[in-house]
Image (cartoon, helix red, strand yellow):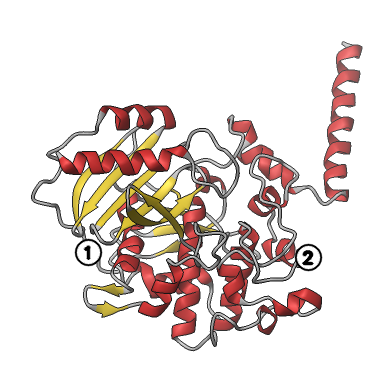
């Protein structure tokens, strides 16, 4: 009995010292990481983790349901599509043809209105909000210095950093995009309750605007600049700029770092569903128009889905681009295989949400699953 009491006391002391060490070394965010992710059996963020964090509600306005195509759900998934859906844990697969739902199916207990994490698809929304802020005169242009909004980035190379550089992932900062390392700045940003402090710790180490380097911190910094420029919280700006005007059928949630700091995790974490996510793809497909009304400047939309750097043809301003079978696709992408894939010439939108994107080569490269989701959608459409 004495041994057991000594053991318990020792464990309490060790645990206390561990907690103290985390606070002293400014890594106490790991406590939240363990509680919300690792103790639940996950090694990284997961689809419904938004329930474990603080969120702000983004209300919808008057719903504008997608019409059903005359051939709605007359074709089933191909065998290849069924296989990858099972292997990668697809929860939603939707094909929209000529602005009508041509095919939709939901899996693993999820349904058409189920909310799941957008992950980095949120970056496309943030870039769109930058375009909206330029359109409304809050931001002068893509070339406006970040220093005008964030005084922490006014010295040295940072003085040359523009909002356009942030949107196109060309900041030149020392952000290190690692999802599975508990000590990376990416992990810190996901769990820290003061995102502004995390972003302000970044250093611009190479000349901005010269090359593409995927960095979630760029989008987070851009969000902070937009909030300073507009004087509006980003979740409110999304509500009034896109979520309501595009007729979203459901309200949504956007994670914030904490109730006290109330800064959105701008690089990720909008909890919504496939058909409401698809609306933003349609807006860009239609050159910024929604049902005849110009919501977003068409010149900005065209620039967004055009590569900024010749050496990096896969990225524009907040959007990815991919050529396949002689077709040109642009897309929103998220960490676990969240996709809104658009082929404007064919008037096709493909949406896939799920638990995994399969084997990962490295950050900011196209995984093999994307090609399969596209290929199999077109096989279904040809039947």
Look at the image and tell me whether residue 183 can be seen. yes
| Crowding at mark 2 (Cα within 10 Å: few <14, some 14-19, many 20+) | some
> Residue drawn at (49%, 81%), measured in percent from left and top?
133
Give the image quarter of residue 300: bottom left
Q: Residue furthest left?
A: 70
Look at the image and tell me whether residue 262 can be seen. no
Residue 260 in percent (x, y) is at 65, 64
- Distance from disc 1 to disc 2, alpha carbons, whole Å, reads 46 Å
| Crowding at mark 1 (Cα within 10 Å: few <14, some 14-19, many 20+) | few
- Tell me if 156 is positioned left or right of 306 in this view: right
Residue 95 in percent (x, y) is at 25, 48
Label 2: element kind: loop
The residue under label 2 is 205
- The foreground one among 364 and 229 is 364
Depicted 378 relative to depicted 308: above or below: above
Instruction: Give me the disc on residue 157.
Output: none
> Residue drawn at (59%, 29%), measured in percent from left and top?
41
The residue under label 1 is 64
Depicted 226 relative to depicted 370: above or below: below
Which circle's residue, 1 or 2, is located before the other in the chain? 1
- Tell me if 340 is positioned left or right of 233 in this view: left
């Amino acid at each position: 009995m004495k041994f057991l009491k000594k053991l318990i006391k020792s464990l309490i002391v060790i645990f206390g010292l561990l907690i103290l060490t985390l606070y002293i070394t400014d890594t106490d965010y790991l406590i939240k990481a363990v509680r919300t992710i690792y103790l639940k059996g996950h090694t990284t963020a997961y689809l419904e983790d938004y329930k474990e964090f603080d969120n702000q509600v983004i209300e919808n306005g008057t719903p504008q349901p997608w019409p059903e195509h005359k051939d709605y759900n007359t074709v089933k998934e191909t065998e290849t599509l069924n296989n990858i859906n099972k292997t990668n844990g697809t929860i939603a697969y939707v094909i929209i043809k000529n602005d009508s739902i041509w095919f939709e199916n939901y899996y693993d207990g999820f349904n058409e209105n189920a909310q799941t994490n957008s992950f980095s698809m949120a970056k496309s929304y943030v870039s769109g909000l930058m375009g909206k802020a330029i359109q409304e005169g809050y931001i002068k242009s893509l070339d406006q210095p970040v220093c005008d909004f964030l005084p922490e980035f006014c010295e040295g190379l940072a003085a040359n950093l523009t909002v356009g550089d942030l949107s196109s992932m060309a900041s030149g900062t020392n952000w290190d995009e690692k999802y599975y390392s508990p000590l990376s700045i990416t992990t810190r940003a996901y769990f820290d309750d003061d995102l502004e402090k995390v972003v302000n710790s970044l250093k611009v180490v190479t000349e901005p605007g010269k090359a593409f380097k995927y960095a979630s911190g760029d989008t987070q910094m851009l969000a902070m600049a937009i909030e300073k420029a507009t004087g509006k919280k980003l979740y409110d700006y999304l509500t009034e700029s896109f979520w309501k005007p595009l007729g979203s059928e459901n309200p949504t949630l956007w994670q914030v770092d904490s109730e006290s700091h109330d800064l959105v995790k701008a690089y990720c974490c909008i909890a919504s569903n496939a058909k409401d996510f698809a609306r933003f793809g349609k807006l860009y497909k239609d050159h910024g128009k929604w049902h005849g009304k110009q919501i977003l400047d068409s010149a900005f939309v065209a620039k967004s889905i055009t590569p900024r750097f010749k050496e990096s043809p896969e990225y524009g301003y907040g959007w990815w681009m991919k050529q396949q079978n002689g077709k040109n696709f642009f897309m929103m992408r998220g960490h676990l295989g969240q996709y809104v894939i658009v082929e404007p010439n064919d008037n096709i939108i493909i949406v896939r949400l799920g638990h995994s994107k399969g084997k990962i080569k490295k950050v900011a490269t196209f995984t093999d699953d994307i090609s399969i989701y596209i290929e199999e959608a077109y096989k279904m459409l040809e039947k």
